[in-house]
Amino acid sequence: MTPQDLNRRALERFRAGDLDGAITDWNAAIHTDGQYARAYANRAIALAARGDVQAALADHDAAIQLQPDNADLYINRANTYEDAGDLQRALDDLTHALTLDPQDFGAQFNKGLIHQKRNETPQALAAFNAILQLDDTFAPAFAQRGLMRFRLGDHVGGLADLDSALKLAPNNPTYYVNRANLHLLRNDAQSARADLDKALQLNGEHLEALTFRGNLHYRLGDYDAAIADFSAAIALSPDEGALYLNRGIARGAQRDFVAAIADFTTALQHSPTLTQAYRDRAVARAQNGDPQGAIADFSTFIKRGGPQTEQERAVIQGHIARLRG
């Protein structure tokens, strides 16, 4: 088989999830033609998917050495750097890719997202602006720019961008969730709930929307609705301790302390570092007539560094003293 034939078969294997088979074919293609940049580039992606980051980076380097003017190769290496947590090198590669192809939306968008991860909001905003100057119909850029504008204090502009994103992509539930967050930051709970309802009409299994709406229902005092949303979220993600914590808090607000204690216990089984659950379970145990269990949980909360301030520590210690009588 020619190197090109091996590359095509490797791609088929890669798409089918056969990483080892794909890598074997790319090994053979490179053995046949050591100057075949595409084989190095593709093998790099497969190696990264398999978790072999250093070998992937070596292949990216080899591909770039063979084709230094190919913007896609820098973008591929940036993706591997980003997955490995090296955001600066990822940014450097994306910046270079854009010098080679200034109209590459993917590179510009990823650059904006990385700046966002690094809390470099003005730089992220500039990246999304650059995309929209080239194409004002790219909904993801409006959505992300809206979040950045809001973060910089431009609340009207942020909401306007989310509105634009939804006009372009009216069936994207995540955009409704994003806009709901902006509404809530402006203390407009009713508009936030309407957006979350719409998101869940579009996708009833949208975990973020369910969790967000559950917290909003709790904030508005609708504990039954909050518990229903958290229960639906738990059905989708049964190993996420924070969901049990949230449901336990809502059940505690209903004075269903037995159910709340069960939820806090499950939260800790799934997420042992979720120290807030010790404090909340302590409160529920105290209310449920179990002072010794409450003392034990409050003590564990302190021991694990739960109190964020000396004042909070003093309050917890006061609870323990009262429970001891």
Image: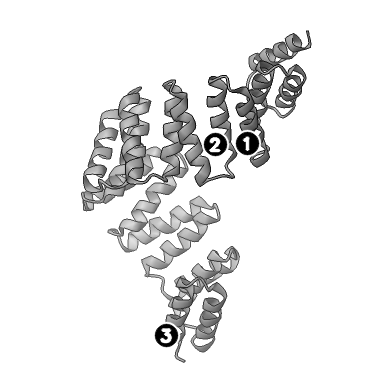
Residue 120 appears in the figure: no
Q: Nearer the viewer, mark 3 or mark 2?
A: 2
Residue at x-position 64% and y-position 34%? 274
- Secondary structure under the numbered disc 3 in the rendered image: helix
Whether residues under marks 2 and 1 lie with C-beta atoms below 8 angstroms apart, the answer is: yes
Provide residue 285's location: percent of width, then percent of height: 68, 21
Residue at x-position 43% and y-position 38%? 210
Q: Amino acid at mark 1?
A: Ala
Quick one: label 3 or label 2, which is nearer the N terminus? 3
Where does label 2 land, which residue? 243
- Secondary structure under the numbered disc 2 in the rendered image: helix
Q: Amino acid at mark 2?
A: Leu
Depth check, front residue: 222 or 297: 222
Depth check, front residue: 81 or 281: 281
Where does label 1 land, which residue? 267
Q: Would you say 137 lies left or right of 242 here? A: left
Whether residues under marks 3 and 1 lie with C-beta atoms below 8 angstroms apart, the answer is: no
Depth check, front residue: 156 or 21: 21
Q: Quadrant of residue 153?
A: top left
Which circle marks residue 4 in the picture?
3
How many residues crowd mark 1 within 10 Å: few (<14), some (14–19), many (20+)? Answer: many
Residue at x-position 31% and y-position 38%? 198
Provide residue 56's location: percent of width, then percent of height: 55, 67
Q: Is 216 above or below relative to 175?
A: above
- Measured in 3D between alpha carbons, the distance from the residue under mark 3 to the one under mark 1, in whole angstroms, is 52 Å
How many residues crowd mark 2 within 10 Å: few (<14), some (14–19), many (20+)? Answer: many
Provide residue 296's location: percent of width, then percent of height: 76, 23
Provide residue 59's location: percent of width, then percent of height: 53, 71
- Secondary structure under the numbered disc 1 in the rendered image: helix
- Measured in 3D between alpha carbons, the distance from the residue under mark 3 to the one under mark 2, in whole angstroms, is 50 Å
